Amino acid sequence: MTKVIKGGIVVTADRQVQADILIEGETIKEIGPDLKGDEYIDAEGAYVIPGGIDPHTHLEMPFMGTTAAETFETGTWAAAAGGTTMVIDFCLPGADGSIKNAINEWHRKSAPQICSDIGYHMAITGWNEQIFDEMKYAVDAGVNSFKHFMAYKGALMVEDDEMFASFSRCVELGALPMVHAENGDLVDLMQKKFLAEGKTGPEWHARSRPPEFEGEATNRAITVADAAGTPLYVVHVSCEQAHEAIRRARQKGMRVYGEPLVQFLTLDHDEYLSTDWDHSARRVMSPPFRGREFHDSLWAGLQSGSLQVVATDHCAFTTEQKRMGLNDFTKIPNGTNGLEERLAVLWTQGVETGRLTPEEFVAVTSTNIARILNIYPKKGAIMPGADADIVVWDPKISKTISASNHKSIIDYNVFEGTKVTAQARYTLSRGEVIWAWGQNSQPQPGRGRFVPRPAFNSAATALSKWKALNSPRSVQRDPLNIPAGV
Ligand SMILES: NC(=O)NCCC(=O)O
Ligand SMILES: [Zn+2]
Ligand SMILES: [Zn+2]
């Protein structure tokens, strides 16, 4: 059975071309004019883009005394409605600290629920021999990236020496270290100080995590990565201080990748000043939303290439869960939504304003992510042989984002009231239409697959080669010229 996506403008990370796409089974067979097939999908007047990949989600993740409400089913369904065909979700070890058990637990939860494909990152939340050993288990199981939390002191945070040990292990395994870069010690101090002063509202969440804390930690993580000789991926970059550190490292030739979130590009820290407690608490996340001046820095990073990908960090809690922190902002579960909205908001506020080209949009929402996370060109590409994860992207469907019609399980939306001017007309996952605008599509839990991601992407391999050729060597001395020991 073949399908042809007909009459659209195919947009990839490097070009736009008017062409049809022939799909055979789950993969792309041919791209060209006037293709014939058994079925046709109308792309007239629309762009045809690789399915979005969200490199940063937390579905059903146990966190801060509760569990993220968004399930693997509702999360991947919301993603499909928004044009995202793959998510990379964060696996978190449980009380036993085992990476192996965490991966098995994530498979157990996700497999029967996911509507489209999934991959995992693994969190490193401490350091011991078991973690050292099980990092290899993770890589062999197709999990090739490890997140290190420099914040959440007393819970997930790791120290610099632990990061160095883990980054060095990543070098051996050909895996990619990632960091949540905030100075956790200082955040902890500020939180305690504010609470002691009776400052308990959600506005103090943001004030306890200023951009300087993020910039310092980003610099520190880059220093650790340089010492260990590894590329580095900085998640949820929210401010110029962190962006500046990444820019500087890249100028020195380091392979440091930066991931702003669509929330950080568009939403303002004034939201924390709302007199409606729920409104502010629903937007509590770490790092927090920043001021408009930082949005400009992040957009510039996407334009110039110093920042490479846009994610959501989708970690969705209900209002009831947020109210766990009614009298103490440090107990508000951290996280916001964005999976369904990422592409439409980025298109409307990026491409429609001329900040991004359609090609850059494809690069930062899909292709760059697939390349960095080593699943390109199976994912993130429109070329023969690639998975037919494709979106017919209609730049003429407008809507106003609202919790009243979103697919997410939560009872609010941080983009509520935002007007967007483009939507997925069709979303295809491995050749199957899983979402059709206005056609009462239904979720198909269990049809998604886990996609293993191999280790040793080309950046890791190149850096290891460079380090091996250029690392300092001991001076060879004639034993006769070495003074005898005293
Ligand atoms: N970002 C956030 O507030 N919640 C999810 C956990 C994390 O990524 O730090
Ligand atoms: Zn984080
Ligand atoms: Zn996160």
Image: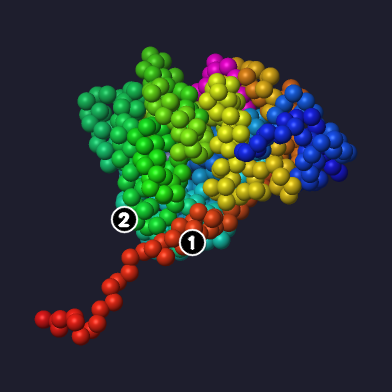
The quadrant holding residue 183 is: top left
Q: Is residue 94 visible?
A: no
Q: Which residues are magenta?
A: 406-420
Say above or below: 321 vs 1. Answer: above
Q: Residues within 10 Å of mark 2 (few under 14, many from 20)?
A: few
Q: Left of 446 or right of it: where is 250? A: left
**Amino acid on which the number 1 mark rests in the picture:** Leu
Residue nearest the observer in this picture, 428 or 371 = 371
Seen at 50% across and 59% down, the residue is: 461
Residue nearest the observer in this picture, 205 or 483 = 483
The quadrant holding residue 407 is: top right
The spot of residue 197 in percent (x, y) is 22, 25
The spot of residue 201 in percent (x, y) is 33, 23
Q: Which residue is mark 2?
A: 161
Residue 415 counted in the magenta span:
yes
Q: Which residue is mark 1?
A: 173
Say above or below: 70 vs 423. Answer: below
